[in-house]
Amino acid sequence: MGYELIWEPPGGIVKRHFGGVTGQELLAAVLATEGDRRFDALRYVINDFTDCTGLSVADSELEEIAAIDRAAHALNARIRIAIVATLPEAVAAGSAYAGSPLNRYETRVFATMREARDWLASAVS
């Protein structure tokens, strides 16, 4: 259904996905983030699926996102990605992205925002 980008100074962004989410919406959020002038300063990304009621994303769409992120990694390799999800299809998609051989970013899936933020805080200087 949609997403919202919430930039958090210094160096963070929360991509809040809500309602029924498609692979094309995931891709749009990636492109909007990586095309933003603040991308070079990013240190973390939180993909928040806690308000997601459904996720329809093909394996090919996840691989496309991972390939785009691989190219972005050449511009900013300091990003860590946290995926917050309990919806089974969102957990599965997050795990597939994290395990993709195309993904270069350190990525983990968490059940709560607190766990994600604690993990991110452990490395953000």
Image (cartoon, rainbow, N blue to C red):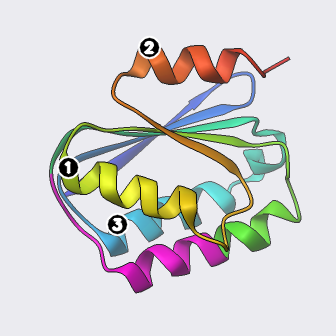
- Please state the extent of the stretch shown in magenta in the rendering: 54-67
Q: Are marks 3 and 1 in contact (CB under 8 Å)?
A: no
Element type at marker 2?
helix
Q: Residue 62 occupies which quadrant of the picture?
A: bottom left
At 88% across and 65% down in the image, what residue appears?
74
- 10 Å crowding of disc 2: few (<14), some (14-19), many (20+): few
When the figure is inspected, residue 53 is found, relative to residue 67, above or below; the finding is above
Q: Mark number for residue 25?
A: 3
**69 drawn magenta:** no
Q: Nearer the viewer, mark 3 or mark 1?
A: 1
Circle 1 residue: 88
Residue 107 falls left or right of residue 84: right
In the rendering, at what x and y percent does residue 46 appear?
Answer: 51, 36
Element type at marker 3?
helix
Q: Residue 32 occupies which quadrant of the picture?
A: bottom right
At 88% across and 61% down in the image, what residue appears?
75
Q: What is the three-letter code of the residue carrying label 3?
A: Glu
- 10 Å crowding of disc 3: few (<14), some (14-19), many (20+): some
Measure how far apart labels 2 and 1 are at the Cα level.
19 Å
Measure how far apart labels 3 and 2 are at the Cα level.
25 Å
Circle 2 residue: 114
